[in-house]
Amino acid sequence: MTFSSALTLAAGAVLVCAVIVLWLTSVHAVIRVVAVQGMALGTVAMLLGVYQHDIGLMATAAVVLLLKGVAIPFLLGRAGGKSPATRETRPLVNVPASLVTSAILIVVAFLTARGIGRFVGTSAGALVPVGVATLLIGFFVLVTRRRPVFQIVGLLMVDNGIALVAFLSTAGVPFLIELGVSLDILLGVVVLMVLTRRLRTEFDDVDLDELQELHD
Amino acid sequence: MFLLFLLLLPLLGGAAIAAAPKHPLVGWFGVVTNGGALILGIILAVRVVRTAPLTGAWGILRADALSAFMVVVIGAVAFLASWLGIHTMALDRHDGHFTPGRATGYGVLVQAFVGTMLLAVLAANLGVLWVAVEATTIVTTFLVGYRRTKGSLEASWKYLVICSVGIALAFLGTVLVYLAALHAGGHSAHALDWTSLMANARHLDPSVMRLAFALLVLGYGTKVGLAPMHSWLPDAHSQAPAPVSALMSGVLLTVAFYAILRFKAVVDLTLGPAYPRTLLVIVGLLSLAVAASLLIAQRDYKRMLAYSSIEHMGLIALGAAAGIRLAIAAVLLQILGHGLTKTVLFLTSGEIMAEEGTSQIDDVRTLLARRPVLGGLFGVGLVALLGLPPFSLFSSELLMTRAEFQVGLGWVAVVAVGLMVVIFVAVVGHARHMLMGPSDVSGTTPPPPRWVAAPLVGGLAICGFIGVFAWPLSGLLQAAARVVTP
C-alpha cells in the first residue's frame, strides 16, 4: 500500500466514523466509534510524521492516539455508563434524515474546501475537505442530539475535524501548541463530564432542551 | 524573568489559598497578588513605552505597549473583583450557601482565571494565545456554576458548549493563518509569532487569509459576546457570582477582542482595511441592535448589565472597524473605561442582590432612599456606563464616533448613536424604577462596611479622573495603538 492510499484510508475512516455516529442511538456504541475516530486521526498524523521524518509530528501523533483514542473515550465511558438512560431516544432530527443531511454536508465541505486543498498543493492537502466534512457533521450532532454525552461527542468530532485539517494542510501546528491544545481539550471534556453529573443530580436525568430556566 | 514573574504572581496567590485555606486572612491573598500584578503591569507599561518590547520565558512571552495596557486593565479589574469577592464569600457563608472546600475552590479558580488572561495578552505566539483563551473558558465554567442552582448549571453548560464551538472555529482560523505563513516562507517554529507574522503579512495568501479572518472573528467573537454568537453571555453573566461576572464582563470579553485586534492588524496589511472593516461593522451593528431590543423590556438588573456589555462590545467592534490610530486609541480607552465601570456595577449589583434577595427590577424600589450608599454607587455607575461626562466612556465614545466619520463610516456612526439613544432611554427608565421614590420603610438599613464601599468608590473615581485628565494614559494609549496600526 502506498503512502497516499494509506493516508486516504485513514482520513476516510475519520469521516466514516462521523457518519456512523449519526446512525447510532446507544451511548456506549457512540463512545466506541469516537475512540476509533481518534485512533484514525492519530494514524493520519503518524503516517505524515513517518513519511516526512518529522519527530515533532510523530510525538504529536502519539499524544493524539493516547488522548483521543484511549483516555477521553475511557473517561466518557465512565460517565455515560452510570447514566440510567443510555440511549438517545428522541433526537431532534431522526436517523434517516440525519444521514441525508450528512450527505449534503459532505458535498458542501468538498465544494467549499477544495480551494484550500489546491492551495496546499500536496496529496495530503487534497484530503482537507474530509476534515471539513467531519467538522460539519460534528456541528450537526451538537445541535440535533439532546443527551449530554452526545453533545460532548459532537464537540469532539468538531475538534477532530479541525485537527485533521491541521495535519493535512500544515503537518500539524508546532508540538508545544499541540500539547496546550490537547490539554485544553482533555480538561474541557473533564469539566463537561462533571457538569453532566451535576445536571443529572439536579434535574434527574436530563434532556438538554429541557433546560429552560433562563430566558428573556 | 520579569514577564514570567508577572504571569506567575496570581497563580502564586492561588497556590497560597490552596495551601492555607484556614488562614484568617486567606481572602486577601488574591487581593494582594492581583494588586501586585496591577503594579507590575504599570511598571511594565512605563518600561515598554520608554524603551522597547520585552520578551521572556524562552520567547514564549512578549510584551509590547498593547500587551502592557491589557495587563493593566486585567490587574485593575482583578484587584477590585477579588477585594469584593471577600465580602461576597462572607455573605454566602452567612447564608449557609456552601462548604469551606468550595470557597477554597472558588479562590483558586479565580486566580487561575486571572493567570490565563494574563497569559493570553502576554503570549508572543498566536497559537499560545488560543490555548490561553480556551483555558479561560475551562476555568470559568465552574465559577459560573458555582451556586449549583438549576439556572447556574444551565448557564455553565451553555457557556462551555457554545464557547468551545466558537473557540474551535478560531483554532481553524489560526491553522489557516499558520498555513498561509508557512507558504510565505515562515519557519514552522516561529510562523505564528506575532512579530514574524507582521513582518510577512504582505506576502500571505489573500484568499486563505480572508477565510481565516472570517473564522477568527466568528470564533473569538463568540467569546467577546458579539451578536449573533452572544446567546451564552446574558445567562452566564447573570448566574455567576458578582465578582466573576465583573471579571468576565470587565476583562474576559475584551481579552478575546484583543485577539481579534492582533489578527486584524495582520489582515489589514494582507488584504487592506476594507474587508475586516465590513465584517466588524456587521457584527458591531448587530450587537448594538440586539442589546437595544432586549434592554427595552428587561426585567432583571444583572441581565441588563449583561446586555449593556454586548452593547459596549458592539461599540468597540465599530471603533476597531474604523481602524485608524485615533480610533484604536479610543477603543483601548473604551476597554479600560468599560472594564472599570462594569466591574463596579456588577459588584454593586451583587451587594444589592444580597441585601434585597432578588435580581428582578420590579421588586427593587426606592433604593436611593433606603440604601443611599449602594443606590448612589449604582446610579453613578450607570451614569458612567451610559457615557455621560465627566466619565471616560464619554471621551472614548466621542473619539470613536469622530474616527468613524473620518474614515467615511458616517452612516454607521449615525445608526450607532441612534441605537445608543434607545439604550440610554431604556436603562434610565429601569434605573429610575429601582432608585427613585420616597422611602416607605421607616429607618434606613445600615450601609455596607467602609472597606466594601471604598474600592467601588475608588473605581468610579478613577473613571472620572481619566475622563477629565488623559495625561497619565495618553502616551501608553498612543504607543499601544501604534502596535496594531503600523
Image (tube, coloured by chain):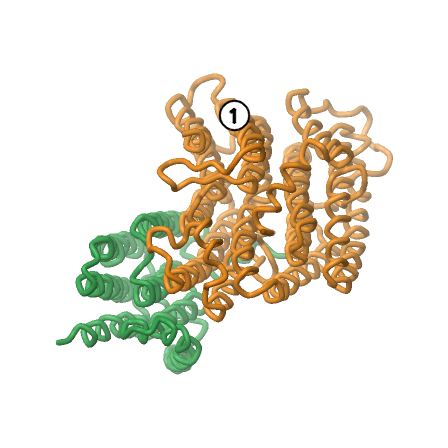
- Residue B307 in the image: x percent, y percent? 66, 52
Q: Quadrant of residue B467?
A: top right
> Residue at left 25%, top 56%?
A64
- Left or right: B320 with respect to B364? left
Judged from the image, the secondary structure of the residue bearing numbered disc 1 is helix
In the rendered image, is residue A141 in sight? yes
> Residue at left 40%, top 82%?
A107
- Mark 1 highlights which residue? B36
Name the image quarter holding the N terminus of chain A: bottom left
| Residue closer to the observer: B392 or B57 | B57
- Residue B199 in the image: x percent, y percent? 47, 54
- Left or right: B469 with respect to B248? right
Q: Chain letter of disc 1?
A: B
Label 1 Cα neighbours within 10 Å, binned few <14 / some 14-19 / many ≥20: some
The chain coloured orange in the image: B
Relative to A50, say whether B134 is above or below. Answer: above
Q: Residue furthest top?
A: B24
Name the image quarter holding the C terminus of chain A: bottom right
The chain coloured green in the image: A
> Residue at left 75%, top 40%?
B384
Relative to A75, say whether A5 is above or below. Answer: below
In the rendered image, is residue B94 in sight? no
Q: Amino acid at mark 1?
A: Gly
